[in-house]
Each structure stands twice: as structure tokens, then as C-alpha cells.
Amino acid sequence: MTTSFFGTDGIRGAVGREPITPQTIVHLGWALGCVIKRHYGKGSILVGKDTRVSGYLLESAMEAGLSSAGMDVVMLGPLPTPAIAYLTQTARANAGVVISASHNAYADNGIKFFSANGTKISDQIQDEIERLMATPMEVVASKDLGKAHRMDDAVGRYVEFCKGTIPRRMDFRGLKVALDCANGAAYQSAPAVFHELGADIEVINNKPNGFNINEGCGSTHIAGLQALVLKEGCDVGIAFDGDADRVLMVDQNGQVVDGDQLLFVIADSLRKQGRLKGGVVGTLMSNFGMERALQEREIPFVRAKVGDRYVMQELVARDWVLGGESSGHIICLDKTTTGDGLVSALQVLTQMKFMQQPLHELAGEMQMYPQTMINVRLPLNTNAAEICQLKDVLDAVAHNEKILSGEGRVLLRPSGTEPVIRVMVEGSDSALVKQCCETISDIVRAQI
């Protein structure tokens, strides 16, 4: 059996974005175990997964690899990615492993690693693992093999942690909340968290069968949640992706509130309360409207490269606590160590209760700018970065930025996952934005 590997925070090169076998995962587990043991000594490594059918196979392969390196293994079962980060830290484990392909379809899977402090592993550790992947496995002696056991209360521990991220006397009584669990890793924890905090909940897509994760549901297919919110008269709807590190929301009118808007709601509410530490980190793809709205409120804002790793780097460097992406991957460093869909949603609901305003009013204080993106497909082995730096392309970008007259921006970005250049334009005039994006895309195509 093979499964597609998609692990943007996992191992590069030797494993890469290509079909992998269980033998590869055994080898990967062994390499991880050897490197962690070399740096921190023999100890335990936590292994969790989402609800994909391939997770059963891959967690067993990972367990075998870690044990062969002499590391003990704690099996967590299906849990949100951020829950594994949290438990790695609080259980005093040496590292954590997540088997998940996030928002991808069920046939894909991938590996993510967390350090002992609940953050992504360092580049140094990752490089060492990659080098070991190119060498034959050397299994430890029988007396030194690692042992494995299950953490039976993993879900309960994470639920209590999530509840602890809001003020002690805060609850959500009086709020009717719709939840879309994407048939993914949050199917147990999300309903428990919001129910125990007093919300009246309506839950959909919380019956995973190994094949229905992200299938027409969750944060990547939000129409079902919009319909539920309107049908049941909910105050808010919350949609997670397959591993629950992302969240999008729906207001009481059925309108989608994306990650940029949620980030703004949290930041602006904290500003009004005098509790915002520093500024906000977005990405190159963050909506121009958020940048403008934050500037108007004198909230510092910087853009990082796309990817939660880069958002985190900026937050740490600036000693700020709030950052995220339009996809709904939001980091609240004063609450947890990584992006967490449940924790982020709790912070939004907390601000709704504190400000005594519905979500559509809080999000409405930020004007979203129209955005158009065209993916220009490239022939294989074309250097996308070089295309973006050609004179005709740079001239086209500069010319169209002048046309936008400071009321928008242009972004060219080579994709990290497929052979395309993403041409994105946003501004206050939707027709002009579309025209500029098509013009630049035509010029990019002409250079290929």
C-alpha cells in the first residue's frame, strides 16, 4: 500500500511530496528516534493522527521505527494537531509526531514533528533526520528496544486545556453555536469544549469513517455550515479543517468570516481593552483591508512569507503574540505554542461576549478588499523565481501598482506545492483588480 505524502512541516528531500510506503515511515521513525536520543537521551515520543484510514497503518509503522531506535512511544489516537503539540510539552515528552494531511483529501497523508516545548522542530534537527534517512537502519539490541503504551485520557486533557484559555468566569451560556468538525481530528474535542462552556451546540460532520475527512465539509467547504447557521438560528458557526489547526467562522447572517477577519477581531478587541501586546503578523497573502484597518487603529502590522513557520518566526523575533493567515491558521502565543483552531475560535467568542457584540459587527469594522488570483501553470523544470524577476514582468507589476494608486497591491509568488506562479491583485475597485490581474498573468505567460 502507498499513500501520497503531503507534509509541509515534515521531512523534505528524501521523503518529499511523493508516494511513500510503510517501510519509509519505519525508516523515518527510526531516524527521528536516533536524532532525538542523541540530543536529549532516551525518553518518550508522542504519536497522534487525524481520522484518515491510512493513519492506522502509518502510526504502527512510526511506532516500529521509533521503538527500533530505542525510544518509548505514547500513542494518542485521533487528536487535533495542536493537541499533540500541547501534550508533547505537558507530558514531558522528547518530541511529538502528527500523522495528518490537514485539509487534503483522505487518500493523502503526511508527517509533522513537534519539539519538546510544543513548537515545530528546529531546522538543525530536521536536517539531521534527513541525513539519517539516506543511511541504512541499525536497530538497537533487543534489551534496548523502546516500549509503547496509549494515553487513554488524551482528549480529556486537551479539552481542559482549551477551556483554560478563556477567563475563568467566562462561559458561553446564551450563545447558540454551530460546529462543523470536518469528520476530522476535532470530532470529539470540539463538541466537548463548547458544550462544557455552556453553549447550545449544533454539530455536523463529526462521524469520521476514515474516508470522509474534509469531504464536502469543514473549513474548505463551508456551505453546509452556512445553511445550518441560518436554519437553526445560530449566533455563530465554526468550521475546522481535518486536523483542526485552522478555523473559519460564519456570522448569524450566514456570511463567512475568514482568518484575516478573525485575526482583526481578536486584535482590535484586545486593543480596545488595552490588552494587546505588540502588533499583528500576517503573510504576503493577508488581505490589504486588514492592513489598512490595523493601520487606522495604530496597531503595528508586518507581513511574513506564507506559512505558519514564518509567522511564528516573526512573532518570536518581535516578542508579539498574535499572527495568522487568511486560511484560518491563527497563532495566539499568549495561549499556546502553535496554531490552534479551537483556541482561536474560543478567543473570538470571548471577545463577542466581552464586547457584547455579534460577530458580524466586530468583523464589519474591517473592510475586506476585493482580491483576484490567477495561477499561471508552468512547464516542468521551469524556474518560477526567475520568471518573476524578468524585466517585462517587473515592469508590468510596477505599472499596475501605479494604476491601483495606493488603493491596492500586486503579488507574484511561485507556489511551493505545484508548478504555478500565483498572480494576486487586490484593491478597492473589483473590476480594476480583475483587469490588472489578467494583464499581469498574460505577460507572465508570454515569458514562459
Image (cartoon, helix red, strand yellow):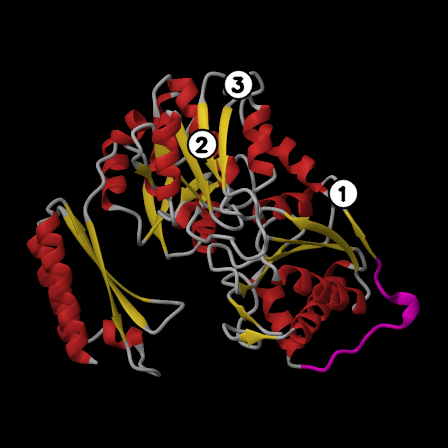
Is residue 296 part of the magenta span, yes or no?
no
The mark that comes first in sequence, 3 or 2, is 3
Q: Estimate how packed mark 1 is, as few (under 14), some (14 to 19) or many (20 or more) residues with alpha carbons within 10 Å.
A: few
Q: Estimate how packed mark 3 is, as few (under 14), some (14 to 19) or many (20 or more) residues with alpha carbons within 10 Å.
A: few
The mark that comes first in sequence, 1 or 3, is 1
Which range of residues does the magenta coloring cover?
A: 135-147
- Tag 1 and tag 2, C-beta contact below 8 Å: no
> Amino acid type of disc 3?
Met
Res. 262 visible in picture = no
Q: CA distance from mark 3 to mark 2?
A: 19 Å
Residue 333's x, y, as percent? 51, 39
* Total marks placed: 3
Q: Is residue 258 above or below residue 441?
A: above
Q: Residue at x 24, y 76 (%)?
A: 387
- Choose mark 1 or mark 3, whichever is in front: 1
The part of the image, by quadrant, that contains residue 55 is: bottom right
Identify the element where label 1 is drawn: loop
Q: Camera-side residue: 226 or 8?
A: 226
Identify the element where label 2 is drawn: strand
The residue singled out by tag 3 in the image is 170
> Amino acid type of disc 2?
Ala
Q: Residue at x 80, y 69 (%)?
A: 68
The residue singled out by tag 2 in the image is 178
Q: Is residue 65 above or below residue 298?
A: below
Q: CA distance from mark 1 to mark 2?
A: 28 Å
The residue singled out by tag 1 in the image is 152
- Choose mark 3 or mark 2, whichever is in front: 2
